[in-house]
Every structure is written in C-alpha cells, then in structure tokens.
Amino acid sequence: MLRACLAFAFALLWLPAVHAEDAGAYRFVDISRQESFEEQVAAIRVEMKDGGRFEFLKGKEKREVEKQFSAIAKVLEARMNAKLDDQDMLAIYAAQETANAILTKKDGRRMICENSAPTGTNVKELQCATLADRERAHKETRRMMRENLDKGQLALGDR
C-alpha cells in the first residue's frame, strides 16, 4: 500500500514537470541531467552573486534554496552508489521542485509583460522587460529620489 501511495505521489510530481518541460520551462536543478549535482549547485551559486542571473534572490530565498540543496545532497550521500528507493526519489524531487520554483521566480532573464497606458493616453500598450531590467530601474529610481530629497533638504537649510 505504501509503495502504491509513493508511486502515485511520484507520478503527481513528475507529470507537472514533464508538462513544464514541454512548455519550454527550464529546470535549474535536475539530478537526471548529465552534469553532476555538485556542478549544478556550483553554477547556481555563482549566478546568485551580484551580476548573476539570480542576483535578486533575497536572503530568505537564498537560505531556502541552500536548504533544498543540502536536502538533496544528504540523500545522495546516504545512498552513494546504491540505487535510490522511492522514498529517496520523492524527497529529491520535492527538494528539486522547491528550489526550481524559487529560482524561476527570481530569474533575472525572466520576461515580465504588462498592459499599461503611457502617461497622457488611455490606450494600453504591452510593455515587456526582464526581471533584471525592472529591478535595476527600480533601484535607480529609488537612488535618484533619495538624491533629490537630499538636495531639497540642503536647499531648505540654506535659507
């Protein structure tokens, strides 16, 4: 009975992943790929630094991704060269999907499109930009507003 439940749970986890791959989604962490898990983790950690693909991950999100990496590594180390059983595979796929969900959401290359009306018109236009472009524009706007506020306060102090 337990095996049947695990097989069903595995099928439920696997089906959305197959559909996502068909739709062009990319799985950043995938132990079934040719490269080793350690190589995948090392590459993702490099991309999590400033200027990388995942530079916009917040501290909590980084910790959660690292937690999922540790969970996968723990299962793989425990089994070493032995075949993984259903319980192990279920744990690995669950951790993989959690990490991939976080990484996909904060992927700097992810395109975000929205319909909005430019200033002065009611005609909506589709405007698209990558997450990285939007985040950088947001940071620049905040920086400029801080500078202008500081200049305004200095000007008031001169009176």
Image (tube, grey):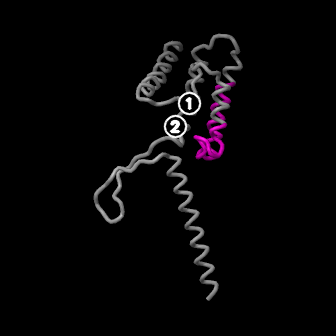
Disc 2 residue crowd, few under 14, some 14–19, many 20+, Cα 10 Å: some
Residue at the disc numbered 2: 104
For marks 1 and 2, give the CA distance: 8 Å
Residue plotted at (65% across, 21% down): 36
Disc 1: CA contacts within 10 A as few (<14), some (14-19) or many (>=20): some
**Residue 156 sits in quarter:** bottom right
Image location of residue 42, percent across then percent down: 67, 31
* Residue 34: % across, % down: 59, 18
Using the image, determine if residue 41 lies above or below residue 53. above
Residue bounds of the magenta highlight:
46-73
Kind of residue at badge 1: Phe
Q: How many marks?
A: 2
Seen in the picture, residue 83 relative to 62 is either above or below; the reply is above
The stretch drawn in magenta includes residue 72 = yes
The C terminus: image quadrant: bottom right
Image spot of residue 16 (x, y percent): 44, 26
Report the residue marked by disc 1: 28
Q: Quadrant of residue 148?
A: bottom right
Above or below, 89 against 155 in this view is: above
Q: Residue at x 61, y 47 (%)?
A: 58
Classified by dominant secondary structure, the portion drawn in magenta counts as helix
Q: Position of residue 20 (x, y in %)?
A: 44, 28
Q: Residue furthest bottom?
A: 159
**CB atoms of marks 1 and 2 within 8 Å:** yes
User: Would you say residue 129 sits in the magenta stretch?
Assistant: no
Relative horizontal placement of residue 119, taking residue 86 as reference (left or right): left
Mark 2, secondary structure of its residue: helix
